Image: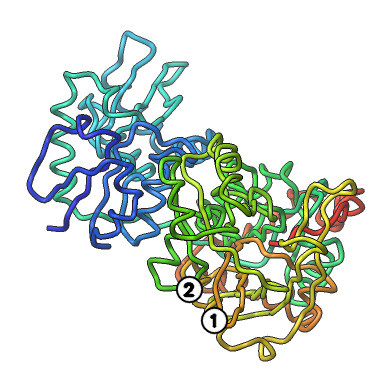
Amino acid sequence: MPLHVIVVDRHADFPWPAAGRIIVTARSFVAETARRLPTSARVVNLCRDFSYLSLGYYVSLLAEARGQKVIPSVDVMLDLHWKRLLRIALPEVNELVKKTFQADPLENPSLIVHIFFGSADDPRLVPAARRIFELFRCPVLEVELRFKAVWSIVSIRPVALRAVRQEFVPAFVDALDRYTHAVWKQERTAAPSRYSIAILHDPQEQMPPSNRKALERFVRVGGQMGLDVEMITKADYGRLLEYDALLIRATTALDHHTYRFAKKAELEGMAVIDDPRSILTCTNKIYLAELLRANGIPTPRTLILDRRRIGRIERELGFPVVLKIPDGSFSRGVVKVSAAEDLPRFAEQMFKDTDLIIAQEFMRTAFDWRIGVLHRKPLYVCQYFMARDHWQIVKHGGPHGPVEGRAKSLSVGMAPPAVVEVATQAASLIGSGLYGVDVKETENGAFVVEINDNPNIDAGLEDAVLKDDLYRAILGELVERLEKRMQTGGRSRPDQARLRDLPDRSDPWRGDALRLANRGGRALR
């Protein structure tokens, strides 16, 4: 039987030892000493707080980065906070609830039920509890049901073990015992079909990942490939299922409409770039740091620190040093600290928003290599030079907005093989989507600095070498995924009657949206 690691905030939170289980505090788990745990260990995260960037969040994030199976996953933590995803996922469960209470009605119009690893504290709801657990694999869930003409679920939320009434604790322990002896599995997503592609963009975005001309080329090249390519915005969330595939060309973030679009597309069996897993993985630098370290990818020397371990920076990295918040982007949330006396001020500012930060060795180079990787193969190469009189490729805070260094495109064959190889290896750890890998090359070798799930594809820069073939390759990857899924009985194309009822797609830009698409500068991703 594999080792099960129970992670709690305090040892007193879990007074039920058993063979095959060890109890670890959350702070010990995120510390380097926990890396000695085998990758085969199965982690049960019972922290009190699963909110974004909390210690409980990092427990699951780092477990996944270390290759360990964990419950709940970070995906589930995020899913449970978005009501729209609950509405998508719950119709089937509500049918089970209605059937249950039609046969056994209740006098009270509301009911709270706890689910422990798929077992309900109310035996009438066992079938519904099992399905909820399949959708949201979390140790303890609190489900609220209400009667308004019919019974339905109004909320599902994770709760801390200490919030469970004492009378239900034996049921929790019994469910845990049974669960840790069961086979762990991961849910499969549905599979889609073919040929209409939505490109999600934000006409108001100051620094979009693709400029206007690049978006125009996606539409034109798609037409040449026999694809119906249309620009959509966040206002088109309700129309997403009209399409077979989704390509995201807006800046991605977790607590953001881009992630919700990606998640809905995946749940509905569409092909999607950026997929939600890639967004989740790439938007957190702590996850990336641990993932790269665990897989032997060379990076600048890196420490993951809480506020009590800041003293390690001077001892192990020295100065200057780069501090990063976990989910910063476009060179934001990143500071260079030149001297020890400046460290407390910068660190304290960052710890206002997160329990953990990254400290990284400073490597001075004239430019960063950007390797675009698609489906685990190098696609394009650029050199991004540092902004003038600055140590990053984008300089923020100027009177006229962000200032960027120049960029230069090369063929893949012109880049140093070691740079291309390490970038491709790093991107392959994330998935088979589209990634931009930043690499610093020094006399000591090539070092991966960052992996971006939503890399720049701008006309005149990233496409300077490949021209239309760059757009053809990205769209072709979506088509290939769709056709593979069709061969396995995936999602079918809407019938002609449905197509006649859909809005007119003859103008992919919807009025004046295009004129707004290229406002501002270009944020390097």
Q: How far from the left and from the top, in percent, is residue 376? A: 53, 77
Using a 10 Å C-alpha cutoff, classify the residue at mark 2 as few (fewer than 14 neighbours), some (14 to 19) or many (20 or more).
Answer: some
Q: Is residue 293 left or right of residue 524?
A: left
Q: How far from the left and from the top, in percent, is residue 308? A: 41, 41
Residue tagged by mark 2? 298
Query: Which residue type carries mark 2?
Result: Pro
The C terminus - image quarter: bottom right
Residue found 71% across the figure and 54% down from its top: 250
Q: Residue 402 got which mark?
A: none
Q: Residue 445 got which mark?
A: 1
Tell me: residue 358, above or below residue 466: above
The N terminus - image quarter: bottom left
Q: Is residue 410 left or right of residue 303?
A: right
Query: Between residues 200 and 91, which one lies in front from this camera angle?
Result: 200
Residue found 48% across the figure and 53% down from its top: 313
Q: Which residue in the rendered view is the most extreme toward the left?
A: 19
Residue found 57% across the figure and 52% down from its top: 323
